[in-house]
Amino acid sequence: MNKSKNLKSKNKGITLIALVVTIVVLLILAGISIGVLTGDNGIINQAHTAKEDTEIASWEEQIDLAIIDAENKHRNPTMDDVIDELINKGVIDSESQVDKDGVITTNEPVYEIAGKLDDYVPFGPGKFANKNEEYTDETSEEEYKTVTVPEGFKILEEASKIDDGLVIEDKKGNQFVWIPVSDINDMAQCANVSATSLCNLELQGNELKCAIHNSTEIVGKLYATTTGENQFGTENKTYNPNSGLREPAVVTDNPSGTGTKYDGDTNNLSIIKENYTTEEFLKDLKSQYKEMATSVAKYKGFYVGRYELGLEGDTPVSKNASTEENRTKVTTADSTNEKTNTWYGLYKKCLEYTVPETNDSSVTSSMIWGSQYDAMMNFMKRRGEESSITSTSNNSIQNNSYITGQKETDVILNLFDLYACHYEYTLEASSILYRIFRGGSSVTSRSPSSRGNFFPHQPNDNHSSRLTLYIK
């Protein structure tokens, strides 16, 4: 009797345990099933995503058909022609559903479709150029009113006037100002120029050539004959490859150009390129100058960094380093960074800028040439800023920090820090010893047009440079 009761009790216990286990397993399976159905990658979400993808693909197909119909009806359809076809196809009900950038807001089910109308959106301020685009500012008083905006850049809507300093920006926020040069003879000359025999540069096909001297060796036309304040404005109508103010040129501490110091020292040149020779460096400088001048002659101008050369990590940038966004990311390039502590490091870093998010850079970057700096000063002079570029700065104007963009008063025609922040190294040479820098620094008040000189191999906290771009 007792044995039977115990057996009955034991069987009852096993049944309860099995029931609990079964319930737990069912709950686990239910949880898994719910996760499979409703998780981020669940069946329900995947089905919803698939539905959206199908609807978007359907709209894109109808948009493509509308574009084809517009092209069949019109030889060169406009945006309005395409919009008419979008309405006919039922993609949209009115033109208000297409914004200025060509983004289409469809009818039900509503989606925003971008990129389909890029070829039909008129280029203008605020729109990134998918190729080199021309923009004309009819309000400009400059002789040549058309700007070529390189692929990968847009014109800032708030800075779209040439006379005020038209600003372009790439997709990483680097900003550059257009410097118009309607006549290349205002900025360059041939190597055979003399005080009694001026030259006349002409663009013959893709070749820049002097019609007077039949020369293709192009050099800078500078607007000073010596360094210092208040020297700007006198055209330097002669060129000596190894003395005076000049470019392109090397400095080697020898009037023949064959010395072993500065540009003749392989340790200095190795900062730019391993196993670089003085002869190769001079050849490259001449080639770079001619390419730049040829581009300026063709496009009637060039771009210069809105801010002094900066570094974002190891990448050269032209950004306002004082903004909240950039304060911890961007530093102004100077001797505090071992890669930019001399002229040679600054020169190399200026060559490394590339246009973000483009397959092939539409521009070539460089350290600013002396003749480009003078072209910038002459542009400002034409725009009524002569007193600004020749007047010594003061603490109420100049940026007395090492942070480019820090002071909004240190700006002329949208170009910051010409009075100060850092002296700005150029490619211009002086005598057999120096490279020329322009403007003032945070500790020394100078006018933007002033010229100073310094040994290119010596570090100096007060020296930086400024990027310049010319269109390929």
Image: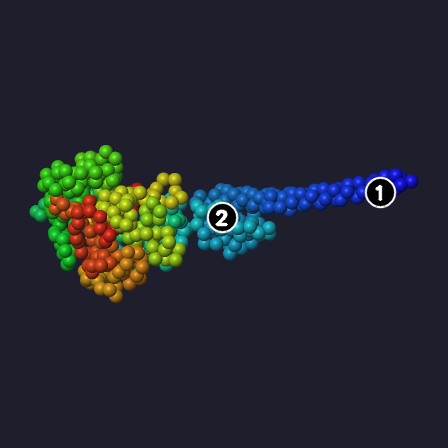
Farthest residue, direction top: 275
x and y percentages locating residue 30 in the rendered image: 70, 44
**Along the polypeptide, which appears first: circle 2 or circle 1?**
1
Q: Which quarter of the picture shows residue 416?
A: bottom left
Name the quadrant of the N terminus.
top right
Q: Is the C terminus in the top left, top right, bottom left or bottom right quadrant?
A: top left
Q: Is residue 371 visible?
A: no
- Residue farthest to the front? 2
- 24 to the left or right of 311: right
Q: Is residue 392 left or right of residue 321?
A: left
> Within the image, what quadrant is residue 23 found in?
top right
For the point 37% across and 49% down, the residue is 170
User: Could you tell me which secondary element the residue under label 1 belongs to?
Assistant: helix
Q: Which residue is mark 2?
A: 114
Of labels 2 and 1, the one closer to you: 1
Q: Is residue 271 left or right of residue 124?
A: left
Q: Position of residue 11 (x, y in %)?
A: 83, 40
List the residue tagged with mark 1. 9
Residue at 31% from the left image edge and 50% from the top image edge: 310
Marker disc for residue 38:
none
- Return the x and y of residue 251 as percentages of the image width and height: 15, 42
Q: Amino acid at mark 1?
A: Ser
Q: Give the CA separation, mark 2 to mark 1.
A: 73 Å
Instruction: Tell which residue pokes out farthest to the right in this image.
Output: 1
- Between 370 and 123, which is closer to the camera in this rendering? 370
Q: In this rendering, is residue 399 above or below 312?
A: below
Q: Give percent across and percent down for residue 324.
A: 39, 58
Disc 2 secondary structure class: loop
Specify the amino acid type for callout 2: Ala
Q: Residues within 10 Å of mark 1 (few under 14, many from 20)?
A: few
- Residue at position x 52%, y 48% from top? 113
Q: Is residue 429 above or below residue 99?
A: above
